[in-house]
Image (cartoon, helix red, strand yellow):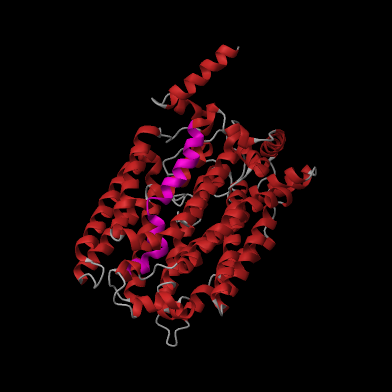
């Protein structure tokens, strides 16, 4: 949300999935299926470079153990950790939503980006599409993603070496410092430095929070809790839009300070929560030889004294995890080619749906077509509600109708609405003037259709599918690649969008629409259905696929020749 905005948020479904990580388990899912199939969606957010393979492997092994259900119930501990983690998602969503709103507020532009403000107000010769074209303005938004990318890799080392809690604390502290700097900013450098600190917080939180959640949750609730992360992101973005709508009306023009500083509220909850929460049993086993301590903790969080089976699996998983040294080398082997292609293609496609354009720049986009400052912020609230709602629907139906069906329906929906928006803007909005009210409302309606299409397809599925297709031995490496690709292209799209809007004009919608056609065809021909397939048996799905079986078949032939 960036994406992948989408990025979603509540403890009931996979925030991480945002449906992009927005989706998760359906109520019709059988518990044993849930245990196997949605088992590690959380790692989605945890970009785990090879340094962190240990804990990822440990989680994965413990989760995918064939021994059936472990003992235990949903305890207060788990509920608290879920709520705390949701704060990590809320902050992420809030940062995404807030930046688009404040960059359309006139007092904010006047103070920090006077060139943009002057172009918007005074220069009648400048095209509607070029008024906001400023590298400095886009670097305000995108600096968060560059910082997040680097912080993610640093965070995985911290999480592995020191445990989950220190990493969550570091993320919360960076969020607090970033929101304070943003709210008190006196010049553009303070502003961008504040965004960089927020980016560091996003990197740490997205790496450690999902991992923490997946380790604390009882296996049969893991899918639901995972989805809560995604849903939280949507809630965060929605709250940001509402706050922008309110603060823009403040007399005196300092409302943007409240918008930026309010990120400190969820950041404080995250930081304080992290101080009081326990470390995860997996982390205790990995970082110390005192297994009794881990057993005592496991008994507390599971609410039962009979935890020996789960403890044995965690210890076994930890030993296996420590024996694998180079997961990145492993994933580039030919037998993992389908997974490697998906690890790169899916997050790339998720960014070029154009969703981040809507998420970051919706208020600016609405102002471009001539809707006033306040109305454009309100329009963003409407699209936020639609996004969160459609992600919630996706959560309920993904295990019933399957991943491919949602990808197809969402793809067609996004393509048609983008073509219509592009057509209306090309025909009705020239380089000067505005669109009539009727057309402006039609554009908002079509953008809602587009956001809904994303919300139940590429939004959640862009995170869910990568999280469930990797075999155990490459899961952490695959997850790292997915998260890194997502951050990189989020940055590229955020940094180039306003320039592209200026040069392509209404054609920008046709540009993203073209990508939607490509990605829908890609899913149709190359992505097998993974609904209800246990993760341990995912390999068979690729070997039975019309295209991938050729790649994997050739590899099998090579092995036979060598033998």
Q: How many marks?
A: 0
Q: Please tell me which residue lies in front, 326 or 111.
A: 111
- The residue that appears at 47% across and 63% down in the rendered structure is 96
520 above or below 277?
above
Q: Which residues are magenta?
A: 338-366
Q: Quadrant of residue 273?
A: bottom right
Asked if one can make out residue 221 in the rendered structure from this viewpoint, the answer is no
Q: Please tell me which residue lies in front, 41 or 442.
A: 442
Q: Is residue 335 left or right of 391 when viewed as pictured?
A: right
- The residue that appears at 52% across and 73% down in the rendered structure is 260
Q: Is residue 24 left or right of 333 when viewed as pictured?
A: left
296 in magenta: no
Q: Please tell me which residue lies in front, 63 or 528.
A: 528
Residue 545 image point, x, y percent: 41, 26
Residue 377 image point, x, y percent: 36, 72
109 above or below 400?
below
363 in magenta: yes
- The residue that appears at 44% across and 56% down in the rendered structure is 493
Q: Please tell me which residue lies in front, 278 or 18.
A: 18
Asked if one can make out residue 453 in the rendered structure from this viewpoint, the answer is yes
Residue 119 image point, x, y percent: 36, 76
- The residue that appears at 36% across and 54% down in the rendered structure is 390
Extreme-bottom residue of the structure: 252
Extreme-front residue of the structure: 125
Q: Quadrant of residue 115?
A: bottom left
User: Main SS of the magenta segment?
Assistant: helix
Please state, as top left, top right, bottom left or bottom right, where the C terminus lies in the image: top right
Residue 25 image point, x, y percent: 45, 44
């Amino acid at each position: 949300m960036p994406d992948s905005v989408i990025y979603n948020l509540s403890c009931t479904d996979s925030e991480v999935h945002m449906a992009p990580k927005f989706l998760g388990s359906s109520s019709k899912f059988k518990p044993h299926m849930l245990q196997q199939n949605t088992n590690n969606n959380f790692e989605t957010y945890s970009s785990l470079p090879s340094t962190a393979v240990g804990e990822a492997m440990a989680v994965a092994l413990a989760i995918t153990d064939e021994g059936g259900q472990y003992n235990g119930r949903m305890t207060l501990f788990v509920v608290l950790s879920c709520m705390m983690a949701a704060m990590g998602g809320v902050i992420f969503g809030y940062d995404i939503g807030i930046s688009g709103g404040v960059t359309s507020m006139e007092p904010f532009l006047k103070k920090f980006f006077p060139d943009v403000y002057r172009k918007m107000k005074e220069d009648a010769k400048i095209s509607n599409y070029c008024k906001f074209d400023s590298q400095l303005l886009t670097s305000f938004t995108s600096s968060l993603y560059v910082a997040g990318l680097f912080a993610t890799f640093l965070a995985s080392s911290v999480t592995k070496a020191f445990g989950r809690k220190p990493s969550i604390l570091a993320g919360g502290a960076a969020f607090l410092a970033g929101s304070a700097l943003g709210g008190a900013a006196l010049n553009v450098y303070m502003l961008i430095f504040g965004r960089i600190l927020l980016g560091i917080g996003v990197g740490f939180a997205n790496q450690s929070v999902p991992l923490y959640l997946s380790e604390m949750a009882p296996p049969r609730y893991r899918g639901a809790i995972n989805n809560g992360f995604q849903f939280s992101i949507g809630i965060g973005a929605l709250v940001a839009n509402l706050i922008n709508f309110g603060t823009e009306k403040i007399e005196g023009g300092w409302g943007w300070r409240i918008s930026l500083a309010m990120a400190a509220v969820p950041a404080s909850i995250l930081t304080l929560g992290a101080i009081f929460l326990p470390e995860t049993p997996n982390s205790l086993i990995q970082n110390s030889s005192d297994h009794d301590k881990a057993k005592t903790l496991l008994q507390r969080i599971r609410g039962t004294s009979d935890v020996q089976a789960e403890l044995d699996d965690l210890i076994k998983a930890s030993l296996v995890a420590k024996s694998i040294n180079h997961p990145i080398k492993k994933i580039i082997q030919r037998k993992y080619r389908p997974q490697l292609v998906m690890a790169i293609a899916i997050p790339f496609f998720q960014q070029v749906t154009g969703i981040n354009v809507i998420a970051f720049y919706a208020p600016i986009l609405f102002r471009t077509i001539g809707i006033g400052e306040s109305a454009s912020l309100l329009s963003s609230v409407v699209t936020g509600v639609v996004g969160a709602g459609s992600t919630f629907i996706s959560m309920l139906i993904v295990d019933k109708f399957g991943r491919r069906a949602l990808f197809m329906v969402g793809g067609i929906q996004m393509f048609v609405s983008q073509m219509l928006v592009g057509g209306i803007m090309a025909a009705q909005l020239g380089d000067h003037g505005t669109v009539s009210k009727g057309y402006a409302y039609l554009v908002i309606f079509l953008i809602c259709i587009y956001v809904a299409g994303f919300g139940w397809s590429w939004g959640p599925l862009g995170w869910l599918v990568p999280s469930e297709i990797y075999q155990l031995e490459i899961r952490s490496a695959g997850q790292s690649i997915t998260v890194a690709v997502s951050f990189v292209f989020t940055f590229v799209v955020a940094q180039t969008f306003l320039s592209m809007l200026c040069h392509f004009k209404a054609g920008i919608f046709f540009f993203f629409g073209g990508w939607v056609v490509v990605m829908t065809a890609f899913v149709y021909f190359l992505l097998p259905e993974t609904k209800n397939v246990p993760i341990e048996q995912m390999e068979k799905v690729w070997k039975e696929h019309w295209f991938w079986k050729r790649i994997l078949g050739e590899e099998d032939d090579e092995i036979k020749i060598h033998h």
